[in-house]
Image (tube, helix red, strand yellow):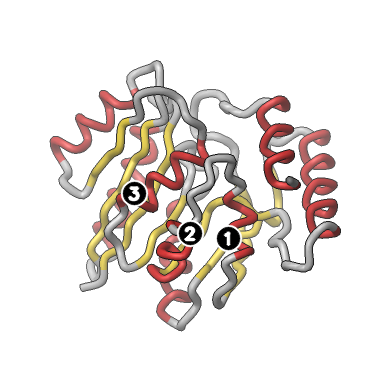
Amino acid sequence: MKKISIIIPAYNEEESLPFLYERLDKLMNEIDTYEFEVLFVNDGSKDKTIQIIKELRQKDKRICYVDFSRNFGKEIAMLAGLDYAKGDSVIFMDADLQDPPELIPELIKYWEEGYDDVYARRKSREGESLLKKITSWGFYRTLQSMTKIEIQKDTGDFRLLDRRCVEALKEIRESQRYTKGLFSWIGYNKKEILFDREPRAAGQTKWNYGKLINLSIDGLT
């Protein structure tokens, strides 16, 4: 039976985790042809995130976690997830349920058809401000103009990666990371699916324009 690792970076997500687990548990129980592990990377949360994760682990051994000593940022959390994931494929998703778990069967379907990187592209960005939509549009177009590598536009981290993609990404150990660009840089056989991004299930976004600008600089440089 193939194993699929679901990697979820989490920073101060105590309000979202119960809703996330409920939907993931339902989905994993319905898909009985695969073995699952859910690997949380607690990125130095200051609330009860790690306590809730540990409680989930006590009742469900599919739950695993890495607990950072401080907040290192999502990019480093994603790398840690790749280092510790054991699956034949991995799925990155956010803890706030803007990436709907119900899309996972479609990601798996295309992986089984031979695609190495099945990525979810947003066809709408519900709950985001007009300014954020405009700046995001401009950033992806600017980034594409600076490279010959095809960059997946309007695409986040929600995707399934085959094990050979995981091993390629693990070879790149730089600390100032722009993982969305690295997904494009490593190549492999890619497949796009479209989805409507939902508002957060609970809590507040941890991103602000300062952090987004820093991430953009990392991507461009």
Measuring 45% from the left and 83% from the top, which residue is drawn there?
A: 113
Measuring 21% from the left and 49% from the top, which residue is drawn there?
A: 62
Measuring 40% from the left and 23% from the top, which residue is drawn there?
A: 70
Q: Which corner quadrant of the image does residue 212 belong to?
A: top right
Question: Is 88 in front, or is 48?
Answer: 88
The amino acid pointed to by label 1 is: Phe
Q: Is residue 10 above or below residue 107?
A: above
Tell me, for residue 183, which label it has, or none: 1
**Secondary structure under the numbered disc 3 in the rendered image:** helix
Residue 201 falls left or right of residue 154: left
The answer to whether mark 2 and mark 1 are in CB contact below 8 A is: yes
Q: Position of residue 148 (x, y in %)?
A: 78, 68
Mark 3 — residue? Answer: 24
Mark 2 — residue? Answer: 169
The amino acid pointed to by label 2 is: Leu
Q: Is residue 76 above or below residue 1?
A: above
Mark 1 nearby-residue class (10 Å; few <14, some 14–19, many ≥20): many
